Amino acid sequence: MDRTFLLAGAVAGFIAVAFGAFGAHGLRGRLSPEMLAVFETGVRYHIYHALALLLTAAVAGRLDSRAVVAAGWLFVAGIVLFSGSLYLLAVTGVTVLGAITPIGGVAFLAGWVCLAVASL
């Protein structure tokens, strides 16, 4: 599982950097400052949790725990739901997507709780 989360973290990090560059160079002037800030929030949490996936990969080999595996998948889900919904909200302006964002936030929180449980 450590290789899975290492790959997921590397891919997520790559995408976060690419989206960050796209937001800074491709969307500036096309989005309102408020929507650009929404997009940037998505990128910020995306990169944080790409790093969390790398941490999960690092501890997966040391801690034999279902909680570590759960943390990794919760971080993946959080990136997709939280950051993904913010990206789509910013680019499309469809406000109903904002209802998905908290689900991704809860996935992030649950992932961190799972890592804490695994440490016990």
Image: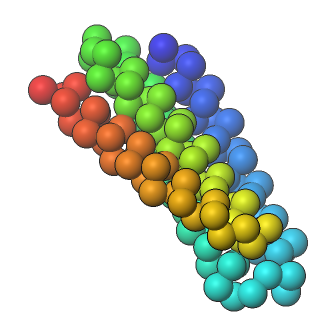
Q: Is residue 34 above or below residue 119?
A: below
Number of numbered discs present? 0
Where is residue 103? Give x, y as percent: 46, 49
Q: Is residue 17 visible?
A: yes
Residue at point 28%, 33% (across, down): 115
Image quadrant for the C terminus?
A: top left
Instruction: Determine whether 9 is above or below 22 in the image.
Output: above
Which quadrant holds residue 69?
top left
Q: Quadrant of residue 23?
A: bottom right
Colour convention:
rainbow
Q: Residue furthest front?
A: 96
**Residue at coordinates 37% horizontally, 14% vertically from top-left?**
61
Residue 50 position, x and y percent, is 54, 43
Q: Of residues 107 and 4, which is closer to you in this image?
A: 107
Residue 19 position, x and y percent, is 74, 58
Query: Residue drawn 56% across and 19% down?
Result: 4
Q: Is residue 112 left or right of residue 28?
A: left
On screen, 108 above or below 2? Answer: below
Above/below status of 42 relative to 12: below
Quadrant in the picture for residue 56: top left
Horizontal relation, residue 48 to residue 9: left or right: left
